[in-house]
């Protein structure tokens, strides 16, 4: 969607996106829930909410359409929809908004008491209600937001308290969403007036570096930084390439210990934070020294761990940390041109974080991988089936591309025909398909945006990936499996957790079959076989039993995000049916492959290197050949890795030793193959 559109054009495209979302089969969802799924996707991108969950619930005087709960359960977001099913933009009366907010207040009151008792254990709403009930003493902030596709006049909303929790209210109407969108940032700009908010200014040094940017060096008090994070949360870190991972790593523990034991030494021990900004307002004292009064569009691009750790120290119960003694150095880069913002800021983020082993440098739709997938999706047509027209799967690299194409169709019939001929899938869909196939359902269960970031990291770790017609065809085959699994699981009426059951079921089939499902056949036929359908139904029942019964009565949603859940599913007793086994790709045939032999000898090896070589030699050559065949047929690993393990098999078959480098890389492939379900 272009950012130069008018409000009415934006509304028309937004409304069309809601209508398109209804094409998915989702049990129990109403129009207002589909609307919630679309607008919450926007709000997640804007940094207004993290990992929102669509959870439809309506009862007398109660309403819930979506929610988000922080990991420590200190903050809760509740969303209620006011959806107008009309292609024409309309206004929403104040009393409608008030009524929706009151239904959400009542919902919260009942949730912290005994609402959970009204639901079965495997119901989606049970998890929401039980989590609030169980953690009601931990909840400090609740934000209730009315979301609507109508226009709402400004409404004064005063905070209230329920027990120890402060309840604030918020309204996102179509005009507010539109203004956020056309700003070019897809988030609301943060403007901080330090004098007005904290009755202070911040001393700084200023340096005009170039016509592109200026740099200011300052020291900010820890109490102020914690209060900023408390108010704005992840929105301060929106451009940061790294998410704060709670107090788990050694770095975070070091920050925590310094705050606790030596707060006055924090400035000496910590590297500080890097900030970008759109503009800064400077005032000067009687000696002409500069002081920062305001920062517009403050974004912490390095130092997310530092910021959140200071905030957490402030929030911890029984904490003796005195943040007034904590000071943090701050480098502020003011980008002088709005046009340069999206080019310069990601580079500052990337280069400021070069000490990290893993870079999340670019989640942009402009990544070459996504551009290549888009290019292939516009040119590759699926085989026609039974006299019907062939399909062309449409990859939406950037939001609004699909609805823009659909808007060119003049009649409802032509629109329906376009959707039938051009099935839609997005970047987050692609990440779901790929991470599920690669047996990472706990990543997929983290939610669309987090899973997409996980996929991006894996993509960068993997290095160059051959994105050709075959890759695209196999991707669509995985998409067909996923879409069919959603329908099949839906029809089992499990009650809740459909998304988790789908990804875990397909991941288990990927594992149990060692990724030998015939993707070429699925592409040719544009459907899954009856045997695969039956297998998905069968495995989904086993998966459902495991994921809705977490150990120790843990939270089901959090359990699904844990690798231990995946291990429990993998280790469960489950045998593939004979009918399904017959359809799997055979890897028994020898490879018609002649790899060049390399043997650099094993002179001057240390003990650990010799052990690796002996371990490789202990594996029969037939296993290496079978693994090479499996890797080729299932499109696992890169070409050089497949060639390597075939070479290793050849050397062992001739009673020759591989080199240490060959053995080291071959063992990596072997271990990853076993993890993916390969067995000789």
Image (tube, rainbow, N blue to C red):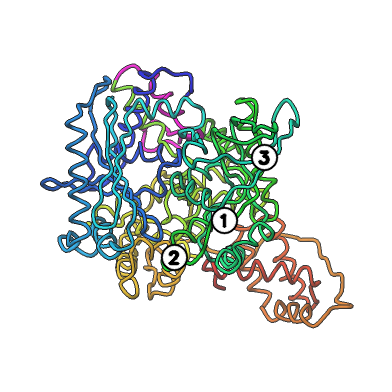
Cα–Cα gap, marks 3 and 1: 23 Å
Q: Nearer the viewer, residue 547 or 362?
A: 362
The x, y position of residue 465, in whole percent, is: 64, 48
Nearer the observer: mark 3 or 1; the answer is 3
Residue 81 x, y percent position in the rendering:
25, 38
Q: Horizontal placement of 225 versus 651: left or right?
A: left
Residue hosting label 1: 305
The magenta stretch spans residue 401: yes
- Label 3 or label 2, whichever lies nearer to me, is 3
Q: Are marks 3 and 1 in contact (CB under 8 Å)?
A: no
The outermost residue toward the right is 603
Q: Is residue 31 magenta?
A: no
Quarter location, residue 269: bottom right
Rendered image quadrant of residue 496: bottom left
* Mark with earlier residue (3, 1): 3
- Which one is in front, 338 or 481? 338
Q: Earlier in the sequence, mark 2 or mark 1?
A: 1
- Residue 429 on image: x %, y %: 44, 45
Q: In whole angstroms, how far apart are the C-alphas of marks 3 and 2?
A: 44 Å
Location of residue 10 with respect to 493 vertically, above or below: above
In the displayed structure, 208 sits above or below 246; it is: above
Q: Residue at x 37, y 28 (%)?
A: 176
Q: Residue 562, labelled with which disc?
A: 2
* Residue range (magenta): 383-411
Residue 204 badge: 3
Q: In the drawing, what numbered circle is on residue 41?
A: none
Give x and y (percent) for residue 655: 78, 79
User: Quick one: label 1, few (<14), some, or many (20+) residues within 10 Å?
Assistant: some
Q: Secondary structure at mark 2?
A: loop
Label 3–label 2 contact, CB within 8 A: no
Name the foreground residue: 152 vs 580: 152
**Majority secondary structure of magenta residues:** loop
């Amino acid at each position: 969607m272009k950012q130069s559109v008018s409000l009415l054009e934006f509304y028309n495209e937004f409304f069309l996106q809601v209508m398109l979302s209804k094409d998915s089969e989702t049990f129990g969802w109403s129009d207002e829930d589909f609307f919630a799924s679309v607008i919450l996707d926007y709000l997640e991108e804007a940094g207004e909410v993290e990992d929102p969950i669509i959870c439809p619930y309506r009862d007398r005087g109660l309403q819930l359409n979506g929610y988000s709960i922080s990991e420590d359960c200190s903050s809760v977001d509740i969303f209620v929809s006011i959806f107008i099913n009309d292609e024409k933009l309309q206004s929403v009366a104040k009393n409608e908004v008030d009524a929706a907010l009151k239904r959400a207040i009542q919902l919260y009151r009942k949730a912290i008491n005994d609402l959970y008792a009204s639901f079965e254990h495997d119901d989606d709403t049970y998890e929401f209600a039980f989590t609030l009930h169980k953690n009601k003493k931990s909840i400090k902030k609740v934000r209730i937001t009315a979301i609507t596709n109508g226009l709402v006049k400004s409404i004064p909303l005063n905070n209230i308290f329920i027990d120890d929790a402060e309840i604030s209210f918020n309204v996102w109407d179509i005009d507010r969403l539109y203004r956020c969108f056309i700003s070019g940032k897809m988030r609301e700009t943060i403007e901080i007036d330090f004098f007005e908010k904290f009755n202070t200014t911040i001393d700084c040094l200023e340096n005009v570096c170039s016509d592109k940017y200026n740099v200011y060096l300052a020291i900010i008090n820890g109490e102020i930084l914690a209060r900023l994070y408390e108010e704005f949360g992840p929105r301060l870190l929106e451009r940061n390439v790294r998410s704060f991972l709670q107090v788990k790593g050694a770095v975070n523990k070091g920050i925590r210990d310094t705050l606790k034991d030596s707060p006055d030494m924090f400035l000496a021990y910590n590297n500080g934070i890097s900030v970008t900004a759109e503009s800064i307002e400077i005032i000067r004292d009687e000696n002409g020294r500069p002081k920062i009064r305001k920062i517009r569009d403050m974004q912490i691009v390095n130092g997310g761990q530092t910021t959140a750790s200071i905030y957490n120290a402030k929030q911890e119960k029984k904490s003796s940390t005195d943040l007034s003694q904590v000071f943090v150095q701050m480098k502020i880069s003011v980008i002088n041109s709005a046009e340069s913002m999206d080019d310069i800021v990601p580079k500052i983020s990337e280069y400021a974080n070069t000490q990290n082993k893993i870079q999340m440098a670019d989640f942009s739709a402009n990544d070459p991988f996504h551009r290549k997938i888009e290019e292939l999706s516009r040119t590759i047509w699926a085989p026609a089936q039974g006299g019907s027209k062939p399909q062309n799967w449409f990859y939406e690299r950037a939001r609004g591309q699909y609805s823009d194409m659909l808007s060119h169709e003049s009649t409802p019939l032509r629109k329906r025909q376009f959707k039938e001929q051009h099935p839609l899938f997005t970047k987050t869909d692609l990440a779901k398909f790929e991470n599920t196939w690669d047996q990472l359902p706990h990543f997929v269960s983290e939610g669309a945006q987090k899973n997409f970031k996980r996929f991006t990291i894996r993509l960068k770790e993997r290095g160059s990936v051959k994105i050709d017609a075959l890759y695209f065809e196999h991707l669509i085959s995985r998409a067909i499996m996923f879409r069919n699994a959603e329908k099949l699981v839906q029809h089992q009426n499990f009650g809740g957790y459909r998304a988790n059951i789908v990804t875990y079921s397909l991941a288990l089939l990927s594992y149990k079959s060692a990724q030998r499902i015939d993707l070429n056949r699925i592409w040719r036929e544009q459907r899954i076989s009856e045997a695969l359908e039956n297998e998905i139904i069968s495995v989904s029942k086993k998966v459902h039993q495991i994921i809705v019964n977490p150990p120790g009565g843990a939270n089901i949603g959090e359990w699904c995000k844990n690798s231990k859940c995946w291990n429990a599913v993998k280790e469960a007793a489950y045998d593939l049916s004979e009918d399904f086994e017959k359809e799997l790709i055979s890897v028994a045939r020898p490879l018609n492959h002649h790899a060049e032999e390399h043997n650099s000898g094993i002179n001057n090896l240390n003990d650990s290197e010799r052990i690796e070589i002996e371990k490789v030699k202990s594996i029969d050559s037939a296993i290496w050949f079978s693994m090479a065949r499996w890797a080729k047929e299932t499109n696992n690993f890169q070409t050089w890795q497949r060639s390597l393990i075939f070479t290793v098999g050849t050397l062992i078959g001739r009673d020759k030793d591989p080199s240490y480098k060959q053995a080291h890389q071959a063992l990596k492939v072997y271990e990853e193959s076993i993890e993916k379900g390969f067995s000789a």
